[in-house]
Image (tube, rainbow, N blue to C red):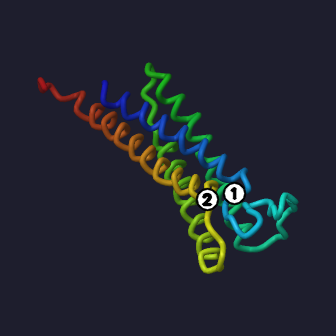
């Protein structure tokens, strides 16, 4: 089954990219640039002096959603590799699909909340950590669709395997 294996490989590669970008985005302090400094989800650096950002509701929601999205993406990556490597067993990828779509949804929520908080501030520009999060978002959804299609192929193959039809 070349198509199923290709879809699973593509899904795993996209999920690996999504995981790396999500962890990178969450852990770095370059979400926005402003005059004389930059800030992220955890710290604000002004003229080289970095300090922790006091707790704000929107920032806490963004950080929590991004951390959960990264965790779900990494768990889905492990599950996807297991599905692909254990070819003797007929493993379904429903949990992996759910985790990938949930990871994408959490990233979407986090990025929309952060954008709505900072888009109206004057002299504030979004930076590469923020855009890494937006880049990880479609990778997560596309990886989920790859596993969904591979699962549908496996399910349809199992369904027609009992028919005495020569295809």
Q: Kindly indicate whether the residue at mark 2 contacts the one at mark 1 (C-beta within 8 angstroms).
A: yes
Residue at position x 66%, y 75% in the image: 123
Quick one: 9 or 36, which is closer to the camera? 36
Instruction: Locate residue 58: give its quadrant.
Output: bottom right
Name the residue: 68% across, 64% down: 33
- Residue 121 picture quarter: bottom right
Decide which of 70, 166 is in the foreground and name it.
70
Image: 133 above or below 46: above
Q: Position of residue 25 (x, y in %)?
A: 65, 52
Earlier in the chain: of badge 1 and badge 2, it is: 1
Residue 96 position in % (x across, y down)? 51, 42
Q: Quadrant of the N terminus?
A: top left
Residue denoted by label 2: 130
Which corner quadrant holds the C terminus? top left
| Callout 1 secondary element | loop
Which residue carries the number 1 mark? 30
The answer to whether residue 122 is above or below residue 114 is below
In the image, 46 versus 96, the foreground residue is 46
- The x, y position of residue 27, in whole percent, is 72, 50
Q: Position of residue 133 (x, y in %)?
A: 58, 55
Residue at image position (46%, 31%) is 91
Q: Residue, x 83% and y 62% (percent of image)?
A: 47
- Left or right: where does residue 50 sit relative to residue 67? right
Separation of marks 1 and 2 at Cα, in angstroms? 7 Å
């Amino acid at each position: 089954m070349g198509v199923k294996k290709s879809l699973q490989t593509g899904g795993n590669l996209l999920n690996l990219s999504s995981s790396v970008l999500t962890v990178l985005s969450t852990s770095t302090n370059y979400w926005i640039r402003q005059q004389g400094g930059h800030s992220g989800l955890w710290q604000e650096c002004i003229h080289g002096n970095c300090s922790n950002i006091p707790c704000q509701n929107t920032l806490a929601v963004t950080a929590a959603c991004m951390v959960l999205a990264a965790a779900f993406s990494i768990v889905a990556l492990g599950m996807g590799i297991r599905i692909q490597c254990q070819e003797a067993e007929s493993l379904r990828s429903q949990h992996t699909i759910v985790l990938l779509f949930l990871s994408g949804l959490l990233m979407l929520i986090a990025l929309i909340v952060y954008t709505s908080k900072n888009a109206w501030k004057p002299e504030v520009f979004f930076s590469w950590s923020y855009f890494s999060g937006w880049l990880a978002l479609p990778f997560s959804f596309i990886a989920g669709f790859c596993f969904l299609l591979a699962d549908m192929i496996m399910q349809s193959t199992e369904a027609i395997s009992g028919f005495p039809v020569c295809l």
